[in-house]
Amino acid sequence: MKDYDIKVRGRCEITFFGTDNDTIIVPSNVKFDSDRDSADIDIEAGSNVTIGIPCEAEHVELDVMDSNISIKDLSFEKLEIDAKGRIEVKIENVKGPIDINMVSGEAVLKVPEGYSFRTNREGKNNFIECSIPQDISTDNVIELNGKNSVLKIVTT
């Protein structure tokens, strides 16, 4: 499986981690559908879940609202977070570009000390607050897209 489409239906606490044996781990209260190359995962509001996907994924897309997300031990070609409201994302041992798409929202991205990344801002009236030194040669691009949104990047 290469693509993961994860929909969060309201405020949740979610932990995603990479599995080292090409398995997918979902709790029983999470809806899971798959076909040959992709998986759809639906998480109901109010959940506190831990989900495992293979540590090397091509495309991971999260559709979230007012949630706290932790992502660790994952490598991807692209992580796309479509968010509403206020989200907080903590990453650890993550490799690949991260796109955060918001309209009139606020996101906090917590990165580990020494994490190599660079930022890019697209859209209208978006702002990235970041006092951490950036590495222009890295493939870990953190991009804010949308309109009237703020992304704050801090160390954990």
Image: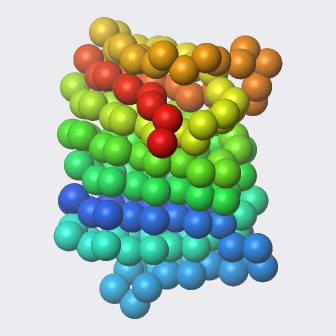
Is there any visible trace of residue 36 in the rendered image? no
Residue 28 sits in quarter: bottom left
Where is residue 143 shown, x and y percent of the image? Answer: 53, 25
Left or right placement of residue 32 versus residue 21 in this view:
left
Where is residue 116 shown, x and y percent of the image? Answer: 69, 30
Q: Residue, x 69% and y 40% (percent of image)?
A: 96
Q: Colour scheme of this structure image?
A: rainbow
Q: Residue, x 35% and y 14% (percent of image)?
A: 126
Residue 54 sits in quarter: bottom right
Above or below — where is 135 with respect to 113? above
Is there any visible trace of residue 96 in the rendered image? yes
Residue 17 sits in quarter: bottom right
Where is residue 56 shown, x and y percent of the image? Answer: 75, 59
Left or right placement of residue 34 versus residue 93 in this view:
left
Total numbered labels: 0
Residue at the top extreme?
125
Residue at the bottom extreme?
28
Above or below — where is 29 with respect to 95? below
Above or below — where is 93 with respect to 83? below
Quarter containing the N terminus: bottom right
Q: Residue, x 43% and y 85% (percent of image)?
A: 27
Question: Nearest the camera: 129 or 80?
Answer: 129
Q: Residue, x 48% and y 42% (percent of image)?
A: 156
Left or right placement of residue 85 versus residue 123 in this view:
left
